[in-house]
Image (spheres, rainbow, N blue to C red):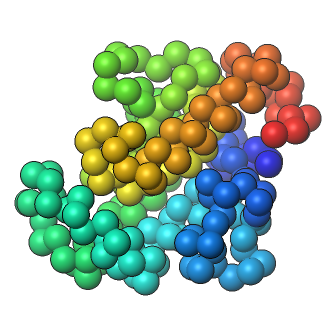
Amino acid sequence: MEILPIFAPYLYVVKYPDDFTLVWNDEINLYFDEDQIGDMDEFDRLFSLWSNPLYLENFFNSNEEYLNAPYWQKYNTSPENLSKLTSKKALDFEKEILKKQSQPNELFQPLHNDNSRLINISEGKAKYNWLRIYAVKIDENRFLIVGGAIKLTFKMDAHKSTQDELKKIAYIKNILIENNIIDGDSFDDALYEINL
């Protein structure tokens, strides 16, 4: 695994190897060329999936039972419609991230709604409708993006895709702590030496 800058010194991202099955697996690999698998960081991988009509239609078709929840009733919940709407929202979300790239504290909030603020080495989320980007806060206005998902359920542990994101967040957070990365200075010192 590698940590790469997106908008240094504010936003960084994890690039997972092709054998990290929470990210690269038979289900997801169908939507990428062979040379992209294991060679894309999470930011690029997510926005590639969220703009892929085939992936989105398949995702919503295979999760139709979740679309009966009250949240989804305000939308035309046909997989075709949600696919088009998600592509548009992904583009808007990416623009929002670009706009606030030097102020990620304005994008990210605590992962769990019962926390009132983000502290160093804590879990965070940026959200745009049902799209989520998950990150670990490194320091004030510094975040490491570890993943993201289309959030279908209120609780993250109620759907496999968000369960997998919880695992990735915990995995990366533990690696940071094991390597004594507790703030921006220790992150900078270890940035290119960390063996994730």
Vertical arrangement, residue 169 with respect to residue 95, above or below: above
Say which residue appears at 67% left-offset and 43% top-offset.
12
Tell me how many marks there are.
0
User: Is residue 66 among what the camera can see?
Assistant: yes
Q: Residue furthest right?
A: 193
Q: Quarter of the image holding residue 93? A: bottom left
User: In the image, is 154 to the left or to the right of 14?
Assistant: left
User: In the image, is 15 to the left or to the right of 89?
Assistant: right
Residue 139 place in picture, x, y as percent: 61, 22
Vertical arrangement, residue 16 with respect to residue 167, above or below: below
Say which residue appears at 56% left-offset and 72% top-offset.
27
User: In the image, is 110 to the left or to the right of 27?
Assistant: left
Residue 113 place in picture, x, y as percent: 31, 25
Residue 161 place in picture, x, y as percent: 45, 54
Vertical arrangement, residue 93 with respect to residue 175, above or below: below
Vertical arrangement, residue 163 with respect to residue 81, above or below: above
Say which residue appears at 43% left-offset and 83% top-offset.
54
User: Is residue 142 among what the camera can see?
Assistant: no
Q: Quarter of the image holding residue 175? A: top right
Residue 60 place in picture, x, y as percent: 31, 71
In depth, the one of 135 and 12 nearer the eye is 135
**Quadrant housing the C terminus:** top right
Say which residue appears at 44% left-offset and 37% top-offset.
125
User: In the image, is 35 to the left or to the right of 64?
Assistant: right
